Image (cartoon, rainbow, N blue to C red):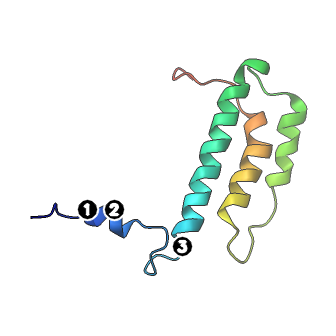
Amino acid sequence: MSAPSNPSAQSNSSTSPERPELPMRIAAIKQAAQSAAEYLQGLDSRPVAPRPESVAALRALCGPLPEASTDAEEVIRSLHEFGAPATLASAGGRL
């Protein structure tokens, strides 16, 4: 008697014809994880309060919302590039 197969592992396959968006979603999650790791690794090399020029750079995120959807990886990249430097540098839970 063979062991039962794991249906959840089969349904999560990145090549599943029922879920063609899955590779893009996985790529976006990996990009978010990489951005988070970079943020945490850089905390010790920056001041706690954001620099004025970092806060001013947030203007790059201002503007009208796009009419069509935007690639999730591009959104994550922009948030990391412009948003992360303008945050309070803390990885603790007190703030």
Of callouts 3 and 1, the N-terminal one: 1
Of callouts 2 and 3, the N-terminal one: 2
For the point 30% across and 63% down, which residue is it? 8
In this view, the residue in front, 53 or 29, is: 29
For the point 80% across and 44% down, which residue is it? 82
Give the numbered dot on residue 6: 1
Residue 86 location, x and y as percent? Answer: 77, 35
Q: Is 35 left, or right, of 45 in this rendering?
A: left
Q: Which residue position is annotated with label 2?
A: 9
Above/below status of 68 relative to 45: below
For the point 85% across and 27% down, which residue is it? 51
Q: Is 43 left, or right, of 24 in this rendering?
A: right
Farthest residue in the left direction?
1
Q: Is 3 left, or right, of 55 in this rendering?
A: left
Query: Which quadrant would residue 75 be assigned to in this image?
Result: bottom right
Q: Which residue position is annotated with label 3?
A: 21
